[in-house]
Amino acid sequence: MNVALGGTFDPVHDGHVALFERAFELGDVTVGLTSDELAPETRHVDRYVRSFEERRRRLVEELEPLAEEHDRSFEVRELTEPTGIATEPQFDALIVSPETTDGAERVNEIRKERGLDPLDVEVVDHVVAEDGERISSTRIVQGEIDRHGNVTPEREGRDAMEPVDDDGDGDADS
């Protein structure tokens, strides 16, 4: 089975890992990573987003061990439009989070218009942080939690337009 998913993935956190895990359980994975131009358009909060190349490098570091564990292959491709790669004929399933189900419906409408079979849509629930709220990149950037959902009262948030230290080494990553 060929599985697609997409996002900005900056920074990658345990909620993203849950999406990746489900994708690799189903088949070989293609991750659409938002382009530098598209990434700001997909944000609900205006904030700094690392470059495509930096996000791609970090994403590959996360995906490699998961692919190996599940004996699957993966590819990371650039997304230049919100419906992205999932409208291409080779995919069988699409992995989404609860807030992106509308996008999955739009993908299947486009596929139908093109005479393609609809994708099986797998909705992966949010991963909850230590404080009971969902883990999100925005919360990590704001200094509320780390990438695993641990509350980080000792951390300060950062300016929305500055890089965040998401690997815990004490310096802002760019």
Image (spheres, helix red, strand yellow):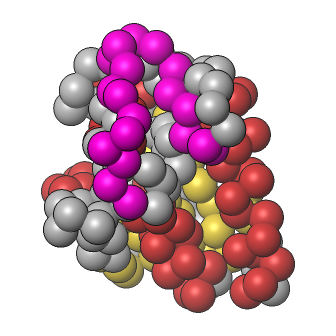
Q: Nearer the viewer, residue 18 or 165?
A: 165
Determine if residue 84 is in view.
Answer: no
Residue at the (66%, 49%) spot, across then down: 59
Relative vertical location of residue 66 with respect to residue 108 in this rendering, above or below: below
Tell me the quarter of the picture where residue 131 sits: bottom left
Q: Position of residue 117 (x, y in %)?
A: 39, 75
Determine if residue 66 is in view.
Answer: yes
Relative vertical location of residue 169 with respect to residue 131 in this rendering, above or below: above
Tell me the quarter of the picture where residue 87 sits: bottom left
Residue at the (71%, 74%) spot, across then down: 66
Q: Nearer the viewer, residue 80 or 163?
A: 163
Q: Which residues are magenta?
A: 150-168
Q: Position of residue 155 (x, y in %)?
A: 39, 35
Q: Nearer the viewer, residue 129 or 90?
A: 129
Give left or right: position of 20 versus 149.
right
Q: Quadrant of the C terminus?
A: top right
Q: Position of residue 156 (x, y in %)?
A: 35, 28
- The kind of secondary structure the magenta stretch mainly shows is loop
Give left or right: position of 6 versus 123.
right
Relative vertical location of residue 145 with respect to residue 112 in this rendering, above or below: above
Q: Quadrant of the N terminus?
A: bottom right
Is 174 magenta? The answer is: no
Q: Position of residue 94 (x, y in %)?
A: 42, 69
Give left or right: position of 31 versus 161.
right
Residue at the (52%, 20%) spot, across then down: 163
Residue at the (52%, 67%) spot, across then down: 17
